[in-house]
Amino acid sequence: MKKISILSRSALSTIVLFWCALSTMPMSAQVAAKNKANKDTQSYRYEIECAGNAQPGSYLVKVWSYSKKKAVAENQCRKNAVHGVLFKGFGGGDGCIGQRAIVSNAGAEDANKIYFDKFFAEGGEFMKYASIVGGTMETVKVGKEYKVGNVVNVRKDELRKAMEDAGIIKSFNAGF
């Protein structure tokens, strides 16, 4: 006599979840490196400072990004520059004027987590607002990590408009 086993719904859903997890695991070193880069960047560990005067509507900032892999830190400079202009601001010095963060509400990043996860995703919208100024990279080995500095031009007026359109911040003339 054949024995037939019937799986409960919970056992079946566990098997399905396990199969889905196996099928979505990264299969190449390139995908694993991107995941590592995103993990390194999610803590947003960087330094940002004024790098000079930019064209009207832009900021010229120097961003120092940290990572165990030099290439990862280089690639994250644009993302960190946009994040810094949005949420940190930067100090002045050497003829520069410091600037406040565009998003002044301290909880705005957490309150709009889904929006910012998509905005800062690999190849995300943040790339439209920042460009690396050629030939400006500096690299310093700090312990087991690299500290990579790049000068980045951030189009702050366009970035501010995008935040207004998304409802993250209010426009300057909203109260009039």
Image (cartoon, helix red, strand yellow):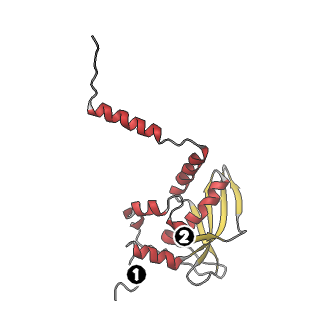
Give SS at disc 2: helix
In the rendered image, the residue lying farthest to the bottom is 176
Residue 99 - label:
none
Sequence order check: which comes first, mark 1 or mark 2? 2
Relative placement, left or right, of 18 versus 138 is: left
Helix or strand or loop: what does disc 1 sit on? loop
| Amino acid at pointer 2 | Lys
Residue at horizontal 47 percent and vertical 42 percent from the top: 24
Residue that carries the numbered disc 2 in the rendered image? 128
Q: Quadrant of residue 71?
A: bottom right
Mark yes or no: residue 100 visible: no
Looking at numbered disc 1 in the image, what kind of residue is underneath it? Ser
As measured in the structure, the alpha-carbon distance from the residue carrying label 1 to the one carrying label 2 is 20 Å
Please say if 175 is above or below 121. Answer: below
Residue assigned mark 1: 171
Where does the image place residue 84, in percent across and percent down from the top left? 53, 68
